[in-house]
Amino acid sequence: MFEKVKKNLGFGMMRLPENGDIDYEQVSKMVDLFLANGFNYFDTAHGYHDGKSEVAVRECLVKRYPREAYTLTDKLTAFMFASEADIYKAFEEQLRICGVDYFDFYLMHSQGRGNYDQYKRCNAYGVAQKLKAQGKIKHVGLSFHDSAEFLEQILTENPEVEVVQIQLNYVDFDDPGVQAGKCLEVCRRHNKPVIVMEPVKGGNLARLPKEAEAVLRSLSGGSNASYAIRFAAGQPGVFMVLSGMSDLNQMKDNIGFMREFVPLTDEEKRAIEKVCRIFRSKHTIQCTGCRYCVSGCPKHILIPDLFSDLNAKKQYGDWNSDFYYGEVHTVGRGKASDCIRCGKCEQVCPQHLKIRDLLVEVAKTFEGKRQ
């Protein structure tokens, strides 16, 4: 379907090396090495590096290589438009900044309950199809952060979408909040090839706890990142895995194990599962995600999802948990601070969790509130 794409590792230009500003010299060396080893997929967005990522694409890639040498993905982000007319203007500006006449892939960025209505109201998906008909976009897709159920809705309403970018890594695969595995299933059911983002979970799966590190060190000597990226790349339906490589050494490491991609062995899969169990043992809340508590909540709080956010915040300390709390799990639903302490949730919890008290901790962590 995507003949121009040569290999299944993409250069995500979201975490580029900096020395006060983006280090164009090092990025250019990374681009050269990437292309020289047969890879050609580059991913950017207007907001990455405060608007400077697209400029880096132009300076380090577009000006230095012929257009047929690379595959370039850009995205339409919600802050860029308030009307249909705005989308055309924003798109042309992106082409100008990147220095290209077309994008190979153009994605509706970070789709979820918090912004999907804006994209529908402004006919964003329709505009993308018109731009495709003009030859300015080769393939239209979307990137996604929400539940599998909502992804099902979007793909049902927009069957013309050709590709879906989802967050997927081995610790998020069965996570009840991120629902990576379930989202992958939805994509496969709709026959949509998948692009993976955050395969190393923002670098957290490269920086493991000591006991998890020891598990992977007992294997054949690959880097922590190698097991995470190969896990993602080996999932059925995945055609591209993005790596946000931020220096030349990371680039060399990624290229080394992805030049001739080999899926995880059974031994490596067992090791990954051990690492997952170590992470799960560190959870502060032993919620199994049965969701019995959700149906009876008068404030419609997605309790298991908020617990998942708190667990992730304590384990990784990254932006993802804040994003999911504020932009996914509480959009159109209750926040932790909305709890009226009726106790219905605790009456049906098989794990006998003190849910009301735990929601106080969630509210303090994500909303700065004490109840």
Image (tube, rainbow, N blue to C red):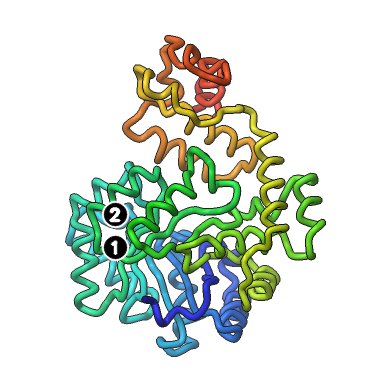
For the point 56% across and 79% down, which residue is it?
A: 31
Task: Give the amino acid type for the residue marked by disc 1 in the picture.
Answer: Val
One can see residue 366 in this view:
no
Counting from the top left corner in percent of width and height, residue 97 is at 37, 74
For residue 230, what is the image quadrant? bottom right
For the point 22% across and 52% down, which residue is it?
A: 157
CA neighbours of label 2 inside 10 A, class few (<14), some (14 to 19), many (20+): some
Secondary structure of residue under mark 1:
loop
Counting from the top left corner in percent of width and height, residue 179 is at 47, 44
Q: How far apart are marks 2 and 1 (CA)?
A: 7 Å
Q: Residue 88 carries which label?
A: none
Task: Find the residue positioned furthest to the top.
Answer: 342
Secondary structure of residue under mark 2:
helix
For residue 227, what is the image quadrant? bottom right
Question: Is residue 158 depicted above or below 249 in this figure?
Answer: above
Task: Find the residue positioned furthest to the front.
Answer: 266
Task: Give the amino acid type for the residue marked by disc 2 in the picture.
Answer: Leu
Counting from the top left corner in percent of width and height, residue 326 is at 43, 37
What residue is pinned by disc 2?
A: 155
Counting from the top left corner in percent of width and height, residue 314 is at 63, 35
Question: Is residue 117 depicted above or below 85 in this figure?
Answer: above
Q: Nearer the viewer, residue 239 or 34?
A: 239
What residue is pinned by disc 1?
A: 161
First in sequence, mark 2 or 1: give its number.
Answer: 2
Q: Do the residues labelled 2 and 1 touch (CB within 8 Å)?
A: yes
